[in-house]
Amino acid sequence: MRATINVLVGGLLAAAVTATARAETTLTIQLTDGQAVKTVGVIDRWDQDGNHRTPPDKDAKIDAPALDARARDAGNGKWVFEKLKPGRYDVVLLGDKLRIDGFTYVPVREFDPFIKSDAQPDEEAAEWIFEDIKASKHYENKVEPLYLAGDDKVVRVLVMLIRDKPTSYTPGAGTMRHEMWQYSWNYGGWQKERRTKVFDRVLMQVSEMRQWTWLWEPKLGGIEVKKEPVTIKYTVPKAGDRKLKGLYPY
């Protein structure tokens, strides 16, 4: 009897391992003009409800994000993730003082859906929200709205917050973080939700921060990986073109 049970358990485990292996697939990132990129990784940042899979690390380093997987450099701009588990990934490109993060418009309130990056509010709403963020006062002395998406009821904004003035932290250190904010249309006007969704927090020397390029790209966010191999083609913008939004050397 015991031998029979052991055989059954062993068979179930083997079946589970086989099913997991079958579920794994390949993600290929084909870069054009990607000579400056030295590492390509992915982050499985959010679950299906928009909750953190891993809370932001308070000791995070700008040049060492917590990647869930790293791609193999296959040459000629091709980076390959092998045996990648199904999920929704944000791609991260890293180089010498260069970082480009993919992102999605994650829910801020519970039970709200993700917003697609191509969903755009009208220009008047976007302008009002950008001006409201720039006019508001915060602990950080640089608060910059980077991207937004939404409709006539809800708008979400990826915001960069930097404090490069003296703080009570280590002398010469500054702070930087990125958050998703939400504005909701209530009683005939736009109101900012108090709750936000934090992407990251970084503490580093201001002199080093000012040398970095850390940009954000919605095209590299929310890459859905299922059973079939996926290939993403992406042209890395030249820094001088400033097509992407985020931190540039200053």
Image: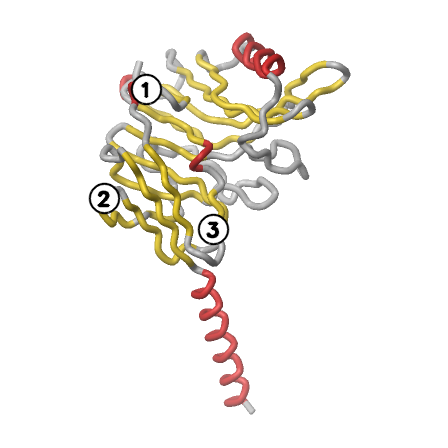
Q: Looking at numbered disc 3 in the image, what kind of residue is underneath it?
A: Val
Look at discs 3 and 1 and give the one toward the viewer. 1
Q: Which residue is mark 2?
A: 76
User: Which circle's residue, 2 or 1, is located before the other in the chain?
Assistant: 2
Q: Quadrant of residue 141?
A: top left
Local crowd at mark 1 within 10 Å, few (<14), some, or many (≥20)?
few
- Residue at 45% from the left image edge and 65% from the top image edge: 22
Q: Looking at numbered disc 1 in the image, what kind of residue is underneath it?
A: Asp
Q: 155 above or below 3? A: above
Q: CA distance from mark 3 to mark 1?
A: 31 Å
- Residue at 62% from the left image edge and 15% from the top image edge: 125
Q: Which one is in front, 76 or 47?
A: 76
Q: CA distance from mark 2 to mark 3?
A: 23 Å
Q: Secondary structure at mark 1?
A: helix
Give the number of the disc on residue 225. Answer: 3
Local crowd at mark 3 within 10 Å, few (<14), some, or many (≥20)?
many
Q: 159 above or below 63? A: above
